[in-house]
Image (cartoon, rainbow, N blue to C red):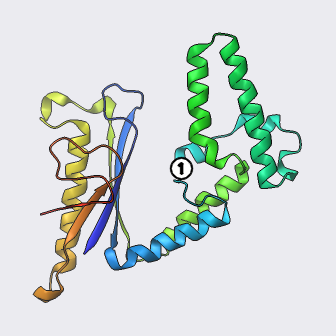
């Protein structure tokens, strides 16, 4: 049995707020999944991120508010969290009092998305991403499938499928082809099945589901 975990980056709407839409799937044999999960869990524990999702786009941003904390790099992690959150709370209160609703809402969203990582400096967060990438690169049994759509050149008149549907079809097609190649030459009793798990919204018309109940791909 193979599992393929699918996640997206960008928005499929045209024009939306991104120039590209990317859908990627990571395929791992089900009996190796625990090993990979343990490797990532070990890294999360090292960076005090147990039970937190790793959102790379938010992790890799520069946190301007950390520069507002005197001697931030010399503080321990609990003190860093305290000082950054204190600054953030005061900033939200300032925006709220000034009646800057749109800026308040966007700032609040940014703070919520980065809250788990505020104790990590820029260099800490780069090391975190590097450690995760190195851990996954050591999983020789893992395969990555991806589809990147430049929405500037996407012509909806030439296809009945939406951008996210088209991307999903490409991922499924490549995943199924990989499983077929893996199965070729294998005795019938050893042939592999496959399942796809999506991280967010299901694609319209696609036989998928959110975790933890992945749907079988025929």
**Rendered location of residue 187, percent (x, y):** 13, 89
Q: Nearer the viewer, residue 81 or 204?
A: 81
Q: Nearer the viewer, residue 131 or 159?
A: 131
**Displayed quadrant of residue 48:** bottom right
Quadrant where the N terminus is found in the figure: bottom left
Q: Residues within 10 Å of mark 1 (few under 14, many from 20)?
A: few
Which residue lies under the disc numbered 1? Answer: 56
**Rendered location of residue 136, percent (x, y):** 48, 69
Residue at 74%, 46% in the rendered image: 81
**Displayed quadrant of residue 15:** top left
Q: Is residue 67 above or below residue 34?
A: above
Q: Is residue 106 visible?
A: yes
Locate residue 178 relative to residue 73 in the image: left or right.
left
Q: Secondary structure at mark 1?
A: helix
**Total numbered circles:** 1
Q: Is residue 74 above or below residue 27?
A: above
């Amino acid at each position: 049995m193979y599992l393929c975990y699918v996640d997206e980056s960008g928005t499929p709407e045209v024009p939306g707020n991104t120039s590209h839409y990317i859908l990627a799937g990571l395929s791992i044999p089900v009996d190796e999944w625990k090993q990979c999960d343990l490797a990532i869990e070990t890294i999360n524990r090292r960076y005090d991120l147990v039970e937190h999702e790793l959102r790379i786009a938010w992790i890799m941003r520069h946190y301007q508010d950390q520069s507002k904390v005197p001697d931030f790099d010399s503080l321990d992690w609990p003190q860093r969290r305290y000082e950054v959150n204190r600054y953030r709370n005061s900033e939200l209160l300032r925006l709220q009092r000034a009646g800057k609703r749109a800026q308040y809402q966007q700032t609040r969203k940014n703070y919520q998305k980065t809250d788990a990582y505020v104790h990590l400096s820029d260099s800490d967060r780069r090391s975190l991403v590097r450690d995760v990438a190195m851990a996954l690169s050591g999983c020789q049994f893992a395969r990555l499938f991806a589809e990147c759509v430049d929405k500037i050149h996407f012509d909806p008149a030439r296809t009945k499928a939406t951008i996210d549907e088209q991307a999903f079809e490409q991922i499924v097609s490549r995943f199924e082809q990989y499983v077929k190649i893996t199965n070729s030459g294998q005795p019938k009793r050893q042939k592999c099945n496959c399942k796809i798990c999506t991280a967010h919204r299901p694609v319209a018309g696609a036989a998928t589901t959110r975790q933890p109940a992945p749907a079988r791909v025929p």
